[in-house]
Amino acid sequence: QVQLVDSGGGVVQDGGSLRLSCAASGFPFEMYMIGWFRQAPGKEREFVAGITWSSDSIGYADSVKGRFDISRDNAKNTVYLQMNDLKPEDSAVYYCAADHKYSGRYHYTKDHRKYEYWGQGTQVTVSS
């Protein structure tokens, strides 16, 4: 059974930090691109960060560059999103997602519609 389990969300103050985790099972995780997306109420789901299966390509949305850091541990089937200097506009439900078809060692897609597997989401709330 394919599973992506997001965790690590919570409530923090402006300027605080959180680390999200995405634990995978049921598919060959080491062959999949993993992306983090977020969705705030009334807004479309947006790409936040992504890392290819080999970690050779990593990318971030402009809004989080320099504050967020994505990494993966293929031995543990887990991807992490370290979020620092959080702002109220970062508040959203965060989802991890996995893609194999549209990504490779050096490229990936930011289009959420192309991702095959999804986590259940974890809420991040940043208070001002």
Image: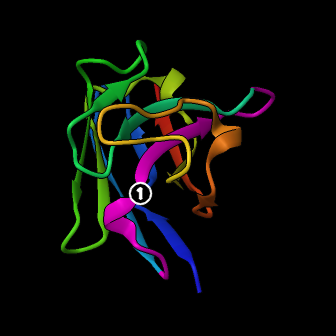
Dot 1: within a 10 Å radius of its alpha carbon, few (fewer than 14), some, or many (20 or more) residues? Answer: many
Name above or below for residue 66 compared with residue 127: above
Q: Is residue 102 magenta?
A: no
Name above or below for residue 57 compared with residue 118: above
- Give the image location of residue 7, x and y in percent: 43, 64
Instruction: Tell me which segment is drawn in magenta.
Output: 26-43
- Give the image location of residue 105, x and y in percent: 30, 41
Residue at the extreme top: 62
Number of marks present in the image shown:
1
Name above or below for residue 86 compared with residue 100: above
Residue at the extreme bottom: 1
Instruction: Kindly identify the residue that appears in the image at 23 percent across and 18 percent down.
Output: 66
- Give the image location of residue 44, x and y in percent: 74, 28
Residue 52 figure quarter: top left
- 94 left or right of 64 in image: right
Instruction: Identify the image quadrant of the N terminus.
Output: bottom right
Report which residue position mark 1 lands on: 32
Instruction: Kindly identify the residue that appears in the image at 42 percent across and 72 percent down.
Output: 24
Q: Is residue 27 magenta?
A: yes
Instruction: Kindly identify the residue that appears in the image at 42 percent across and 50 percent down.
Output: 34
Name above or below for residue 40 compared with residue 5: above
User: As rendered, which of 4 and 124 lies closer to the eye?
Assistant: 4
- 115 left or right of 83 in image: right
User: As rendered, which of 82 and 107 lies closer to the eye?
Assistant: 107
Determine the secondary structure under disc 1: loop
Give the color scheme: rainbow, by chain, secondary structure or one colour.
rainbow
User: As rendered, which of 125 and 118 lies closer to the eye?
Assistant: 118
Instruction: Kindly identify the residue that appears in the image at 66 percent across and 42 percent down.
Output: 114
Residue type at numbered disc 1: Tyr
